[in-house]
Structures are given as C-alpha cells and as structure tokens.
Image (cartoon, rainbow, N blue to C red):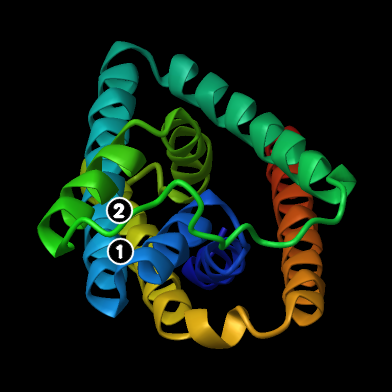
Amino acid sequence: MSFIAFLIAAIVLAITPGPGIAYVVARTVAGGRSEGLASCLGTGVGGMLHVLAAARGLSLIVAQSALAFNLVKYVGAAYLIYLGIRLLLRKDEALPIESAGVKSQGARKAFLEGIAVEALNVKTALFFLAFLPQFVAADQPLVPQLVLLGTICVLLNTLVDVVAVFAAARLLQSSTARTARARLMTKASGLTMLGLGAYLALARREG
C-alpha cells in the first residue's frame, strides 16, 4: 500500500464522528474555546502514548518472529473489516455534543483530562495495532515507520478536533444537518475500513 492510500484512509477515519469529537465539543460547550482547545491538545498527547506503545509492542513481536508479525497483520485486516461492518450497520444517530455531565474546570484540567480520556481508550490502542502495520515496508526499520504513521494519524485527528471546537456553536444550531453529516461520514468511514481490510487480506493471499 502506498503512502497516498494510507493518507486517504487516515483522513477519512479522522473526520468520522466519534467519542473524541463529541468529547472536545462537549468540553467547548461547557468551558468555552480555551477548554476545548486544551482538551484537543490533551487527546493528542494521549494518542501519541498509544502510538509509542504500539510501536514498542509491534517491534517486540517482530524481534520474536516475522511469522507472528504477519499474523498480527492478518488479524489487523480482519479487525478493520469488523469495524467497517459495525459502522455500516450502526443505527443513525446524532453526534452527542451536549455538555450534560461536563462542567467547566479550566484549561489545565481539561488538558489533563483529555490525556486521560484518550490514553485509557482501549479501542484506540486496538485500532493502532490493527491499522499501522498494514502500511509498513518490510525492508525498512519498523519503529520509525510506525511512529511516523501513527503521528500523522494523531495530528489529523487533533486537527479535526480543533476544527470541531471552532465550529461547535454552528453545529449546535441544526440537529438535522448534524445528523445528516454524521450519517454520511460514518458510512464513508465504514466503507473505507471494510474495503481496506478486504484489499489487504486478498493482496497477501495473492502474494
């Protein structure tokens, strides 16, 4: 898979509405733009923790057995297909941006909470373990590739979160439009992951 394919997949996945966007927008509604941006920075740091952990763990797997790493790639492709199917079958729902249960607490606490929210997200860890190995070159050092690709994913996710923070007031104006946008991006992301996982699995079988 080329870097362009990775970038396209990463962008589509980044713009898909999910808990991360909902959290930073809710934080913005509760505490204003400064808290929203601080929470974006926090989730970005938390995401990088997952990237480093994934790079470390996958490098240890490779050190033990190249066969084990290939098995991880197969399992990762299957996991991407699973996520795609789940997104395509998910019932239509608006992005939950209400601030119920979220109170203003200051930018510093919002930053620290953002780190904790993302760092403790098991789904993020599983996603990086499934997604990143699909795009590494076997003849190049593994860890730098994983860190680079993971960092790009985190930067894209953080950029989308920042945009969501600035657009929070506008998003609140129309629940109908918000639902339509969420539905479209969710289906696009589901198709992307489903197609990507299937392509990767079939490509390896042909090889």
Locate residue 1: give its quadrant: bottom right
Q: Residue furthest top?
A: 64
Of residues 74 and 203, which is closer to you in this image?
74
Q: Name which residue type carries label 2.
A: Thr
- In the image, is 56 to the left or to the right of 11? left
Residue 43: assigned label: 2
Indicate left or right for 8 with 155 as reference.
Answer: right
Q: Are marks 2 and 1 in contact (CB under 8 Å)?
A: yes
Residue at 41% x, 76% y: name it.
Answer: 165
Q: Give the residue number, with chain letter if any, for mark 1.
A: 40
Image height check: is 8 above or below 130?
Answer: below
Residue at 88%, 44% (x, y): give it. Answer: 89
Q: Give the image location of residue 34, x and y in percent.
A: 22, 75
Residue shown at 71%/40% (left/top)?
83
**Residue 172's mark?**
none
Kind of element beneath mark 1: helix
Q: CA distance from mark 2 to mark 1?
A: 5 Å
Q: Is residue 55 above or below residue 103?
A: above
Position of the C terminus, as image quadrant, is top right
Report whether residue 162 is seen: yes
Q: Position of residue 173 (x, y in %)?
A: 65, 85
Residue 206 in view here = no
Secondary element at tag 2: helix
Crowding near pointer 1: few (<14 within 10 Å), some, many (20+)? many
Q: Position of residue 46 (x, y in %)?
A: 26, 45
